[in-house]
Amino acid sequence: MIPFYSFEKIHDSIKKELIEKSAEIISSGNYVFATNNFEEEFASYVGSKYCIAVSSGTSALHLSLLALGIKPGDEVITVSHTFRATVAAIEYCGATPVYVDVDKDTFVMDHTQIKEKINNKTKCILPVHLYGNMADMNEIMNIANRHNIPVLEDCSQAHGSTLDKKHAGTFGSLGTFSFYPGKGLGALGDAGCIVTDDKEFYDYLCKARSWDDNEIGFNYRMSNIQAEFLRIKLKNFDNVLKEKRHIANEYNKLFTYVKTNNVEHSYHIYPILCNNRNQIIQDLKDKIELKVHYPRPVHRLHAYKSSYNLPITDKIAFHEISLPIYPGLDYNAVINGLKEYFNDNPTSLL
């Protein structure tokens, strides 16, 4: 059976270096407060002035919203088709998420719906670059600038993604990344970061992640060992992206559900839409491990439940299946297995 994800090829070539770096850090006795080398290198990679290393993508979102001054009574325009951390961070601040639907072709924020949601309580627009595809940041920034509203980009799945050659996270005031192990650029545990060009945000975030003396701070630091692991993996990341994009191009010969519109997609996830999703996953389980992202959109989860009408979000949530995509994948076996199945069950594809 082909697993949904494997770290084997990504880690095999750097395993010796990871082990040596682990031993070096253990011997040093210095386990926190030394993430600056990674911060400089990741900032350079995405093209931002500053990077602030933190403990997770969730803490990155929370701190960024606080840096923007989001507080109870404020509204943040975002999407429900995302991992729940996007919305949880808004709730942590006591603010209210205001949802727009996603675009039917790109599966990310539909910028045409933003304007009607803006009012005097709107204090942030928070697009999510889901699956590695990017929202139309040029249009979103035009809207935000006209209304003087800051933009925070959730790039948790968009490491290496660019729009018109400009990296995800560098359009808005702040961009957040998750380095959860399964992400395109993954740590060997939880980790995240924030990127920005604003020195005031940078200064605030550096203090707030680690028990600031002047106001309530947080224990949101990244450990040194994760920072060093990420430095090693960042050196090989372009090769990872190259392989994933090659696999995606092969999949695209069979399926093209997501349009990219001038985006260089990083393919954290490769989604297709199907009828009888659970049956397909069950029928293929001995050949190919398939996953679902995300079967219940955030606005339908018990903790965040609301009455929004988001038809495209609901359609994707009900029909989406994620295909394996990672370096070293036997993608021909995946393609042949899917081709055989859908030839025998042609109504299964939406």
Image (tube, rainbow, N blue to C red):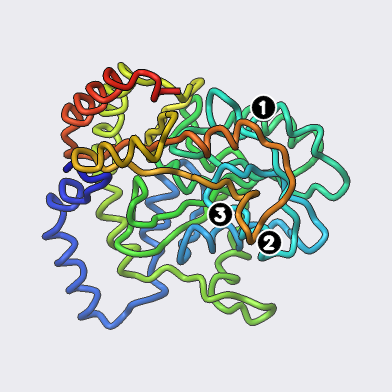
Q: Position of residue 329 (x, y in %)?
A: 19, 37
Q: In which quarter of the image is residue 143?
A: top right
Q: Position of residue 269 (x, y in %)?
A: 38, 38
Left-right relation of 237 to 87: left
Q: Residue at label 2?
A: 91
Q: How many labels does the image show?
A: 3
Identify the secondary structure beneath mark 1.
helix
The residue at the point 19 percent across, 38 percent down is 287
Identify the secondary structure beneath mark 2.
helix
Q: Where is residue 56 in the image (x, y as percent from the top left)?
A: 46, 62
Q: In which quarter of the image is residue 276?
A: top left
- Label 3 vs 2, first from the N-terminus: 3
Q: Quadrant of residue 328?
A: top left
Left-right relation of 180 to 24: right
Which labelled disc corresponds to residue 106?
none
The quarter of the image holding the C terminus is top left
Q: Position of residue 183 (x, y in %)?
A: 37, 49
Identified by mark 1, the residue type is Glu
* 177 up-or-down from 342: above or below: below
Seen from this angle, which residue lies furthest right? 120
Which labelled disc corresponds to residue 139?
1
Identified by mark 2, the residue type is Glu
The residue at the point 26 percent across, 27 percent down is 338
How many C-alpha atoms fall within 10 Å of the one at disc 3: few (<14), some, or many (≥20)? some
Label 1 – label 3 distance at C-alpha: 25 Å
The quarter of the image holding the N terminus is top left
Answer whether labels 1 and 3 touch (C-beta < 8 Å): no
Identify the secondary structure beneath mark 3.
loop
Which labelled disc corresponds to residue 84?
3
* 239 up-or-down from 14: above or below: above
The residue at the point 52 percent across, 55 percent down is 194
